[in-house]
Image (cartoon, rainbow, N blue to C red):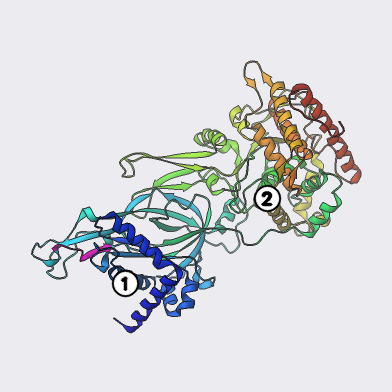
Amino acid sequence: MAPEDVALKEAALIYLDRTGGLHRFISDCRRYNDSKQCHAVYRFIIYVNPADLTELDASLGNCVLHQPIRATYLFQSVCFTSIKTLSLVPQLETENQVNVVLKLTHLPSLPNYSLDLCQFPRGYQLLRYYTVEGVVIALTTVTKYTQGARFLCSESNCPFSTGFRYIRVHIVGATESATVRNDFTCTLCDSALKEDVKFRVLGDKQLVEIIDAAALGVIKGSQVNKSCSRYQSFTVFLRDELPNRMNMGDRYYVTGIPTHVYSGSQLTLCMEANSIQPWLSSDPPVINDNFKYLLSITMSSPWRFTAVLADIFAAQIVPPGTYNTLKLSLLLNLVQTCNNGKQSLEHLDLLIGTSDPVTVDRLLIYSLNLLPFGVRHLPSYELFATVSKDEHGTGTAKVQAGSALLAKGGICYIGDIHSLKKEAFKLLQTVLETRSITVFISGKKFGEDVDQQMSFPIQCNFWALADANMHLKKAGQQEDAVIGSVDVSSVPANLADGFGLMIYCNESSNYNSPVHLILHKLNEAMHQSKPLYPTLQQFTTQDYEEFLAFARNQEAALTMKAERLIQGYYTASRRVRTDPVHGSKISPIALKTLMSLSEAHAKLSLRHKILEQDAVIAILLYEISTTARHGASVLCVAPNAVFPFDQYDEHSLNQRDIYLTQFHQQLVQFCSTYAPGMSVLFAEE
């Protein structure tokens, strides 16, 4: 044995003793000893902090980071010596039976330890630890692999026909055939080796495909970067404790060793995972000073700040003051998404009917790009999930994420809802109700004894567009009617009710004059390099992106008054909108939608409490949506009720405040009349 190896083993023993690893190792040995069962392989997990190890012994720390297989053998020798010296496992015979797995707590925060999924460092010191960052886009079912096996010499007179001389364990990058096959020979007599099957040790294995998070920018519908980067998926092998630790659509840091895996005649670069950490945004979001100033000058009213935000939002796409109800709904939807792994309380889905699908589509794609996670679904994509056979030679079933699963924590923009295939159309209705998707895996097709099912939660909001020129018609009423329903017979009623909100916007109606939109488009075409609205340049797209990220992180507590107002409206509306034959027209998810809208408005207003005024906006939006589906109620809410006046100056904002206050009084009266059991009182009372 080389003197250098002796020094490294001494350092390894000292490290285990100082960090408590030796105590954990002895506890694991006692569990093996208590079982009184003879094993071919005894597996031990040793946790290593590279920083602490390098501080103790730089040579050993460097060995663990850059020569992981050699480091494993060093710790294996230390563990075997400890077992024999302390008589921890009497039934253990040879060092080959000790299977040591080193688990790294982290890697140094240096560029050479990160592996770019777009630019692989091929050839130079590949067989060492790297960290990759990516989003899960596919995963296989959990299967078994051979963790360790015992072989015996087939010649009965050979000394190696008994005992534990020939032990084979899985090492990084090895395939199943490298661990177990029938062409091994005895080193003593050159006879064939045969496996003692009853001593085979099995472990769990799962394959996961990840892709660079920057690739999500391509499927948002935004313009592809001029550099034309190529994004390719990367396969990660999860073994033993790691399977089922990664979820579809989530983003992770994976530490492991890149390996070359042969599948037939093809060579693929993969990674054996050593540890997994969920991705967390490191930089806390901040608010631009211009938004802070805007908030300070609109503090006199709980409605003004969000009104101005919606009015000037997406000025690059539509002129200020156009489609304000839709823009406010989009902002509320963007706020009510997940951030940093937090789960939104309620989902908020949006169905939009319009006679100007091109402009509204541009507006939706622009809004989608303000989120870290968002997907523009295309008809050629799969909406939820597909099942195929894994191409790495395992023969197992692989589930590929569709648009909805990739949009986890964000928004899946479906586009024209009628572009969906018939199967996806029906499945969407079920998903909106259950918020999960179940994939059936045929056992016969994928070499399993029984059929399997895998369920995945759908944790995104849906946006869908319905072209009024093709699918929506006014239900026998004039264009300028204050109260009118929209014929959505082309969209199944259950599917339409599954969306929390339905916003109908018509650019040629009295509420949205087409003149401003036409001038905007003409100026945009003739002056492409000049800003259309110089005064709004201070509110850039990046400013809105940072503002929405900050608002999403806000916590808003529901006040008693807001809760009573929402419940009172919900109860009264169910009584008012009840059909003797079909029952109530108010969807069962209405209460959740109202709560979600109120919370979103409070967050968008940067408040930590959900006030009655937030509930008023939520109820107005929901009543507009319900009127578009089922016609007017006794509340007689106009389609432009959220923005009844053009917001040119402070006077128009004052008029809007008065209008909303009057509606608040009307709403309280409505609740007291049709839901007398709900104690809803107006402030003046």
**What's under tag 1, amino acid-wise?**
Ser
Quarter where residue 458 is shown: top right
Segment tinted magenta in the rendering: 161-168
Which residue position holds label 2? 552
**What's under tag 2, amino acid-wise?**
Arg
Q: Where does the C terminus fall, quadrant-wise? A: top right
Q: Position of residue 526 (x, y in %)?
A: 77, 54
Please report the residue visible at 82 percent of the width from the left and 28 percent of the height from the top.
Answer: 666
Q: Position of residue 406 (x, y in %)?
A: 54, 49
* Left or right: 255 in relation to 570: left
What number is the disc on residue 77? Answer: 1
Q: Which residue is situated farthest in the top direction here?
A: 580
Q: Secondary structure at mark 2?
A: helix
Report if the CB atoms under discs 1 and 2 are less than 8 Å apart: no
Question: Label 2 crowding class (10 Å Cα cut-off): few <14, some 14-19, many 20+?
Answer: many
* Left or right: 345 in relation to 287: left
